Image (spheres, rainbow, N blue to C red):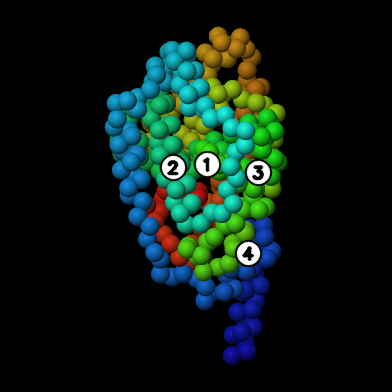
Amino acid sequence: MGEIQTNRDKISSKIAPSLSNFLGRPEFILCLEPDKASHIKTIIDVSYLIKKAENIFQQPDSISPMIYENSLDKLLMELEEMKTRKSKEKIPVVKYIGKFEYLMFWETTFVSAAKWLARIAGFQDLEISVKIDILKSVWMLWARLDKLSETAEYQRGQKLKNNVYMWTEETCMDLKTVEIDLKWCTNYSTEQMLFYLAPDSDSSWKETIERLIELEPTNVELNFMLIQLCLQHASMRKQGKVLEATDRILQIQADNLHHYYTNILKMPRYSNRLEKLLKVNKLVESSVRLRRDRNQISKLFDVFSIDFSHPEMFELT
């Protein structure tokens, strides 16, 4: 019996350091409390979100002026509309995030991403199944860059402090003071889940925001960054019809951007600036890869007591 325990200790000593190195948090002890693991899951049905997206994609009035890829004036008008925010003296700070707040965040973000995709030149020509596949794989990626860019905009204008981030269209949160209630989705304490809640807010988030503040991308540039980030990710994850569709759309948008730089900004040598902008995308990509890896760890140890009817939608949440 002692030999078995010794062997088990040796195995545990090998697993723990590797997890600590992988997660970047030595205090991570979830795997040491198997009694808190959730082997039976409560399924959250998100099929209604798919139906909402299908309705958006099938509405004729969702087809915006952006589809006229040879008309940059219409493209600019649509981009301005997409990025317009209500001017506020003070942005409300979220004090508490629980089940209701998470569900509302997922719904509004998924729907907003669907509306954004519907306005991209060439997207409306795709089969509905391809549209949904793309949306399911990129909606959280879109939200990450969209909210970080908005945070950068407000921090540049000194509307937000350095440790405060935009969370929804109308609200922001201070990661140091916000109360996050996870009792509805895990048996572990909030302290034990700190590694999961904001794993990269002190590094890649801040670096991304700093670069966005420095570069101050125009709405056209930012929209291209979003398109490139999302569609490139979708093509790598899905292949097949999705790969064909995303390659075609990216070419259309690359042509639009070239026209914008050379004819509107009179900047024929724009490669250096574009390279800097796309380095921001690389930071976001690195961040979401870490998020996906940690989600896999959480599944391995049954950290969460919930699952989703469409789990592929939540790989990056």
Residue at 51% x, 22% y: name it: 80
Q: CA distance from mark 1 to mark 3?
A: 12 Å
Q: Quadrant of residue 137?
A: top left
* Label 1 – label 4 distance at C-alpha: 24 Å
Location of the N terminus by quadrant is bottom right
Using the rendered image of the protein, determine whether residue 81 is visible from the camera's viewpoint: yes
Cα–Cα gap, marks 2 and 1: 8 Å
Disc 2 vs disc 1: Cβ atoms closer than 8 Å? yes
Foreground: disc 4 or disc 2: 2
Q: Is residue 18 visible?
A: no
Observer-nearest of 164 and 264: 164
Regarding mark 3 in the picture, which secondary structure is present there? strand
Q: Residue furthest bottom?
A: 1
Residue identified by numbered label 4? 191
Q: Which one is in front, 243 or 152?
A: 152
Disc 3 marks which amino acid?
Val
Amino acid type at mark 4: Glu
Work out whether mark 2 precedes mark 1 in sequence or the reverse, and give the earlier one: 2
* Looking at the image, residue 73 lies above or below residue 176: above
- Provide the residue designation for mark 3: 164
For label 3, the crowd category at 10 Å Cα-Cα, with few meaning under 14, some 14 to 19 and many 20 or more, is some
- Residue 108 image label: 2
**Residue 171 in the image, given as x and y percentages of width and height:** 56, 42
- Element type at marker 1? loop
